[in-house]
Amino acid sequence: MGKGREREKEEKMKGEGRRRKERETEKGGERPKEKGNRALTKPPLEPREKNKWILVLGLDGAEKTSVLHSLALNRVQHSEAPTQGFNAICINTEDGQMEFLEIGGGEPFRSYWEMYLSRGLLLIFVVDSADHNRLPEAKKYLHQLIETNPILPLVVFANKQDLEAAYHITDIHEALALSEVENDRKMFLFGTQVTENGSEIPSVMQDAKDLIAQLAADMQRPSPGPLYNS
């Protein structure tokens, strides 16, 4: 009898501990996906001025998260589900760190896109090269973003180039009217694909990663002050 009551009391305490942990998780609103990454359902706090975000935007279904994870891991890593909110990832480089902020591409989350432009170092915009019907919609949102911030460097990923229905990057350039982007803005277009899970990222993805690191470093470098004659 005594041992039975002790076991019952122990199980009750374990159950209360589990429920307490669940309540703490719900209050925090943050659940880690993997080491160094975090999925956020609420907007993250405003970053320090010297530590702005590299924004990753685009319509839902473009596989933004897969692109982002592949850049972080140097290996192809498909995401299992669309981002519902915010996804923040920090990538270490030789010169420091790059902080990426992906915002979900579903309609409820697009209102946050322009809000975060002022906090961006550069904009990565991902499109599904094989989803022809949604390219006009992607073009509309992209041009709204670049009109809001006229100096932010732009890197466009024409993703899913491995699919048979995918438009060539020259067709993507035309469909997104990238020729209308101001000449003063740094703008780059990459044809990308994330194929077999666990394989090394294609060389074009590595080139894009190196370019992004360079653009981010240039944007963080303080501008020279005025020159005075003595």
Image (cartoon, grey):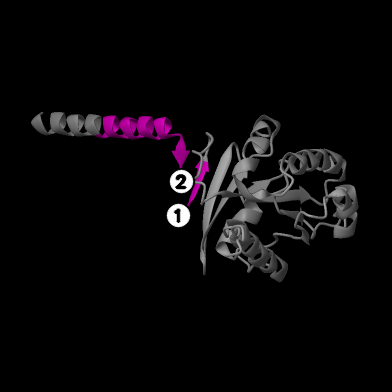
Residue 132 shows which numbered tag?
A: none
Label 2 close to label 1 by CB (< 8 Å) = yes
Pinpoint residue 141: horizontal percent, then vertical percent. Answer: 77, 39
Q: Is residue 162 above or below residue 152?
A: below
Number of numbered tags placed on the structure image: 2
The answer to whether one can see residue 198 in this image is yes
Name the residue that disc number 1 marks.
Answer: 35
- On screen, residue 48 versus residue 21, left or right, reads right
Q: Residue at x 62, y 47 (%)?
A: 120
- On screen, residue 177 versus residue 56, left or right, reads right
Name the residue that disc number 2 marks.
Answer: 32
Q: Residue at x 26, y 35 (%)?
A: 14
Closest to the observer, 8 or 80: 80
Query: Residue reaching furthest left?
Result: 2
Magenta segment range? 14-39
Residue 87 image-quadrant placement: top right
Query: Residue type at mark 1?
Result: Lys
Pinpoint residue 80: horizontal percent, then vertical percent. Answer: 61, 47
Residue 225 image-quadrant placement: bottom right
